[in-house]
Amino acid sequence: MTEETLVEKVRDALSPSRFRHTEGVVKTTEALAKRYGEDVEWARLGAWIHDIAREWPIAQLEQYAEQIEIPSGFALIPNLLHGPIAASIFRDWFGPDHTDVENAIRFHTTGRLAMSKMEMILCLADAIEPSRQYPGVDDIRELADRDLTEALAASMDSTILYLLERHQPIFPLTVMARNELWERKITNARESEA
Ligand SMILES: Nc1ncnc2c1ncn2[C@@H]1O[C@H](COP(=O)(O)OP(=O)(O)O)[C@@H](O)[C@H]1O
């Protein structure tokens, strides 16, 4: 499938405002992929498709989820199912040989342990694309240009704070990912001092 065909499928699946969000994620993903030496073409395809199931009704998400493998815990928070479902649609359309992009799509909202560069880029781009507005987002945008690990760790802090303040469930893997990224950041800093 060409990028143009994918874009039309995404446009059909999303409201104008979420399509604009997706355009922002594509732009930010491309900039981060260039900055950190990741494959720009595949990163863009992952960014285009990441929210393709975001506006499905919960019943449709749950029905689709029964047909595919869903990482443990996702089914408990139906809002999170759209990532694994988009990853499965990506595999159907682009084949089984792009597991890194597929995982970046699957874990774009939650993160996970041992994230690859591609996974970190899409997860961060989703959080800082130009139409996102929340306290501290400009600091994270600045950090994103200097340090991918620290920027993603800070963005996960912000997500966790947002969910805590609203008494919403927090996906445990996000907390583990956040802890690991801050540990990675400390290790990287020690190594560059030595
Ligand atoms: N780590 C998380 N744990 C639990 N819920 C989350 C987490 N991250 C986001 N959410 C919730 O999931 C929904 C989708 O998050 P959002 O960041 O808007 O994803 P997307 O950018 O893919 O649309 C929101 O309702 C948000 O509150």
Image: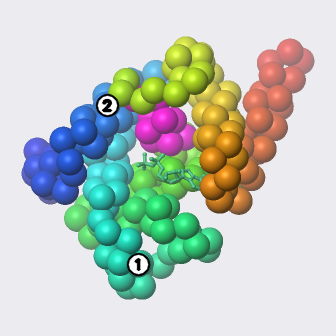
Q: Which SS does the magenta portion mostly show?
A: helix
Q: Which quadrant of the figure contains the N terminus?
A: bottom left
- Quadrant location of residue 72? bottom right
Q: Kindly identify which numbered label has been placed on residue 177.
A: none
Q: Is residue 132 left or right of residue 91?
A: right
Residue furthest to the front: 166
Q: Is residue 76 left or right of residue 54?
A: right
Question: Does the segment drawn in magenta span residue 45?
Answer: no
Q: Are marks 2 and 1 in contact (CB under 8 Å)?
A: no
Residue 46, percent across and down?
34, 48
Instruction: Decide: few, some or many residues near mark 1? Use Cα within 10 Å; few <14, some 14-19, many ≥20.
Output: some
**Residue name at image x 67 percent, y 52 percent:** 167
Residue 45, percent across and down?
28, 46
Question: Does the segment drawn in magenta span residue 121?
Answer: yes
Q: Is residue 13 left or right of residue 122?
A: left
Observer-nearest of 166 and 9 = 166
- Quadrant location of residue 12? bottom left
**Residue name at image x 54 percent, y 40 percent:** 120
Mark in front: 2 vs 1: 1
Query: Above or below — where is 90 with respect to 8?
Result: below
Magenta range is 120-129
Q: Which quadrant of the figure contains the C terminus?
A: top right
What's the distance in space between the residues labelled 2 and 1, CA to CA?
Answer: 28 Å
Query: Above or below — where is 123 with respect to 129?
Result: below
Q: Kindly identify which numbered label has been placed on residue 62.
A: 1
Observer-nearest of 28 and 117 = 28
| Dot placed on the residue nearer the N-terminal end, 2 or 1 | 2
Identity, as a three-letter code, of the amino acid under mark 1: Glu
Mark 1: secondary structure: helix
Name the residue that disc number 2 marks. Answer: 24
Residue 31, percent across and down?
38, 24
Query: Above or below — where is 71 with respect to 159?
Result: below
